[in-house]
Image (spheres, coloured by chain):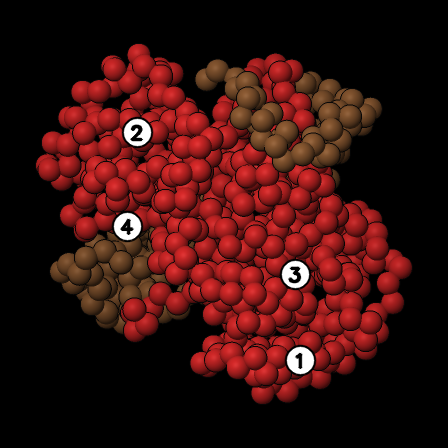
Chain colours: A brown, B red
């Protein structure tokens, strides 16, 4: 908790509560007495569990934010999005092609985009969501992967889409296609796997496993460190 | 909340020393100096913070009070009427926990032909995995080898690690990363496919691989997507409150608790894998934590009650750089990658006082010393004290745009509260980060209880008394896969006997016989309580 500062009024699902003005929405819900089960995850802006929809009294506009990353404001009407029943295609990642047709096969609705940009406007991560759907439509899978990378899959975009697109599931398909098919595999990694299977390091490891504590300490303290 | 004019005044001292710091090289501590700073300033060395357990297989071993309180507590099932024959689920492999280790275990168990059920008390993927920003250690470069990695791991763990577990960790690492690459996880690479890699605290080679600063998130969302592609059964908002054993004393299922309806259900299984994660939300010694909301150590409690052995539970990892400012993100993890890229800890006078890449326990202790012993911390208006972490140095070293490109999550998290880490340093203080110990496992994740496996942060022995950065994302994949593979294959040969909860009754009797006062405590905790009334 931070210092007790001034209190302000918020409405949690319509009910009025006085909470310290310095709190995040999540802390305010808890301050008001809620022990969260849904709508709370990593508490650090990574997991997308706490998507929150709010409106300020007197304003018609609906706003959104992650509850753990957004400060309370006076007269906020708050509710959380505990779950969104989005469709996810099932696919075998090893049998796909990195093409627009492949994405369209699983998610044909991306071509129904009407360009309203509601997804981009609502994204709490400030991603250009409509833009990355556009890249997917045109088969620019690398750009779709890049643009969607910071997505936390909170579901707010899909909740607003009049074309019923599930943007975040398109994003992860694009990222997996890009990483598996469009980027060269790391040759040095595969080589190392092969070396290990051939037993190249067995002797070195066995020697370390049987070394005395003093011998290990000596080797550790004298080991060379790659310059930064 | 941006920096106050007073803090801004202090920032000029940090800016004034940048050129000098850029020219000079701050030496790493010698072995004796490390021991001294640990002994005097590491929170684990505060005698009064722990007590010996009075019940169970580890009786006499010291653990933090907050954990002892839960181990010395009563079952949630006391006075609950249950029909253990009324099976809601009857499967081959039961995986408890929906983080990285649980997901990896479920995939590998299914690949052995097993019928798998994965349970998680929050959403699938709500776990510390998703928050790990820094990276994953793999010895895959020409100047590196599993043996070099091994020496770093065991030295970082103060030579206390279980050697067979370190071998498994370091020798499996390249195959684990290759598996993730093949699944389409988007690691940061050069154009020719070479994995980018940098140093982490305590590494002797640049072997920290990463996916921008969403490394754990990228691994988690890839594994979760893969689990969902394979029609693997996942039940969310479903906790496990006790393990079930059969007449042979073998793990054979669990009692489940629906987090929303409050109903109990029974699952029978041939093998059980606990992948419930860590315990930072117990707030040992009152520290803020970087951990996920669900990190309440449930697996430790139910495993211990069933007779599984704990190891290294007297060692907790404090991450050197939790956010000390702004107050809304107190304890937020500031990834070690920030230091890996060149940001240095700096005191109130703008002086560097420790090499930025000491092991986490040493780095944390040095920060605590700078504040408590030398009085060189920076006090914020809430009373929280910290030291600077000079992020603008990153751009001075690597060029403009580096922070935005390599640390987008960090930039976003601080910007939301008015701090621009490209222009200004952050204020940091150590935060409770990782449970070094856990339920003791062998190489395939088996415990001393037959058919009970543990993987991920809930397991103990791999990291000994201190884990290095980047070895946790590695550990969850390596040991998740190992436990899943072994438990999946083993299940085919298991015949489950009659289910019972006699171990729970016996545990209660032992509490009473030893005169342990449980004071109304029940465990596992399942969720922390942060409501107004309980503060």
Between residue B232 and residue B273, name the one nearer to us.
B273
Do the residues at discs 2 and 4 belong to one chain? Answer: yes
Find residue A7 and report its image quarter. Answer: bottom left
**In the displayed structure image, the side of residue B490 where residue B105 appears, left or right:** left
Indicate whether B90 appears above or below A93.
below
* Mark 2 vs mark 1, CA separation in Å: 53 Å
Residue position for label 4: B328
Same chain for marks 3 and 4? Answer: yes
Disc 2 or 4, which lies upstream in sequence?
A: 4
> Would you name the residue on which mark 2 appears?
B353
Q: Is residue B261 above or below residue B30?
A: below
Residue under label 1, please give it.
B506
Q: Name the residue under label 3.
A: B309
Chain letter of disc 4?
Answer: B
Point out the tag, 3 or 4, that comes first from the N-terminus: 3
Residue B466, how many percent across, how many down? 52, 42
Give residue A87's position: percent from left, percent from top.
59, 51
């Amino acid at each position: 908790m931070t210092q007790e500062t001034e209190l302000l009024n918020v409405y949690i699902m319509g009910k009025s509560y006085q909470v310290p003005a310095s709190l995040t929405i999540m802390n305010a819900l808890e301050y008001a007495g809620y022990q969260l089960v849904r709508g709370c995850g990593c508490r650090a802006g990574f997991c997308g569990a706490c998507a929150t929809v709010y409106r300020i009294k007197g304003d018609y506009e609906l706003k959104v934010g992650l509850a753990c990353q957004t400060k309370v404001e006076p007269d906020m009407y708050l509710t959380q999005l505990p779950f969104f029943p989005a469709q996810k295609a099932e696919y075998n990642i090893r049998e796909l092609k990195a093409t627009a047709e492949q994405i369209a096969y699983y998610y044909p609705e991306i071509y129904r985009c009407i360009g309203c940009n509601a997804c981009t406007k609502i994204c709490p991560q400030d991603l250009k969501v409509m833009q990355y759907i556009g890249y997917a439509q045109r088969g620019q899978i690398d750009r779709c992967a890049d643009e969607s990378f910071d997505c936390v899959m909170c579901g707010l975009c899909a909740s607003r889409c009049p074309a019923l697109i599930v943007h975040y599931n398109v994003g992860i398909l694009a990222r997996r296609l890009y990483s598996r098919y469009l980027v060269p595999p790391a040759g040095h990694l595969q080589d190392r796997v092969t070396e290990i299977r051939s037993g190249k390091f067995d002797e070195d490891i066995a020697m370390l496993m049987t070394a005395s504590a003093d011998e290990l300490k000596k080797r550790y303290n004298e080991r060379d460190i790659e310059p930064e | 909340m941006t920096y106050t004019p007073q803090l801004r005044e202090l920032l000029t001292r940090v800016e004034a020393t940048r050129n000098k710091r850029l020219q000079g090289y701050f030496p790493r501590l010698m072995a004796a100096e490390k021991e001294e700073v640990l002994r005097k300033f590491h929170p684990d060395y505060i005698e009064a913070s722990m007590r010996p357990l009075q019940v169970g297989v580890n009786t006499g071993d010291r653990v933090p009070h907050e954990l002892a309180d839960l181990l010395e507590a009563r079952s949630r099932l006391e006075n609950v009427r249950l029909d253990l024959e009324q099976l809601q689920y009857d499967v081959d492999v039961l995986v408890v926990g929906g983080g990285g280790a649980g997901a990896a275990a479920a995939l590998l168990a299914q690949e052995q032909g097993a019928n798998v059920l994965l349970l998680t008390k929050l959403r699938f993927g709500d776990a510390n995995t998703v928050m790990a920003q820094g990276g994953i250690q793999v010895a895959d470069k020409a100047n590196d080898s599993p043996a070099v990695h091994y020496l770093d791991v065991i030295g970082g763990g103060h030579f206390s690690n279980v050697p067979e577990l370190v071998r498994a960790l370091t020798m499996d690492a390249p195959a684990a990363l290759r598996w993730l690459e093949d699944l389409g996880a988007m690691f940061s690479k050069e154009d020719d496919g070479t994995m980018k890699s940098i140093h982490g605290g305590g590494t002797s080679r640049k072997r920290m691989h990463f996916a921008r600063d969403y490394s754990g998130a990228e691994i988690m969302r890839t594994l979760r997507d893969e689990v969902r592609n394979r029609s693997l059964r996942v039940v969310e908002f479903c906790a496990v409150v006790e393990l079930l054993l059969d007449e042979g004393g073998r793990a054979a299922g669990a009692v489940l608790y629906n987090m929303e309806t409050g109903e109990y259900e029974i699952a029978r299984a041939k093998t059980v894998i606990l992948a419930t994660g860590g315990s930072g939300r117990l707030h040992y010694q009152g520290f803020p934590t970087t951990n996920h909301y669900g990190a309440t150590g449930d697996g430790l409690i139910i495993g211990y009650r069933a007779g599984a052995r704990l190891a290294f539970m007297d060692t907790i990892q404090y991450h050197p750089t939790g956010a000390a400012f702004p107050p809304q993100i107190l304890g937020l993890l500031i990834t070690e990658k920030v230091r890996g890229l060149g940001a240095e800890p700096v005191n109130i006078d703008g002086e560097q006082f420790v090499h930025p890449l000491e092991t986490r326990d040493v780095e944390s202790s040095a920060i605590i010393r700078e504040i408590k012993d030398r009085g060189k911390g920076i006090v914020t208006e809430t009373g929280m004290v910290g030291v600077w972490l000079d992020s603008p140095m990153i751009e001075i070293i690597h060029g403009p745009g580096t922070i935005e490109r390599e640390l987008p999550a960090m930039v976003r998290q601080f910007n939301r509260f008015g701090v621009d880490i490209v222009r200004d340093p952050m204020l940091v203080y150590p935060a409770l980060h990782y449970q070094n110990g856990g339920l003791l496992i062998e190489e395939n994740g088996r415990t001393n209880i037959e058919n009970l496996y543990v993987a991920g942060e809930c397991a103990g022995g791999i990291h000994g008394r201190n884990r290095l950065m980047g070895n946790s994302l590695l550990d969850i994949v390596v040991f998740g896969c190992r436990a899943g593979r072994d438990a999946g294959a083993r299940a085919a040969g298991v015949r489950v006997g009659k289910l019972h909860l006699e171990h729970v009754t016996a545990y209660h009797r032992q509490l009473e016989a030893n005169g342990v006062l449980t004071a109304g405590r029940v465990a596992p905790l399942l969720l922390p309580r942060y409501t107004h009334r309980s503060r």
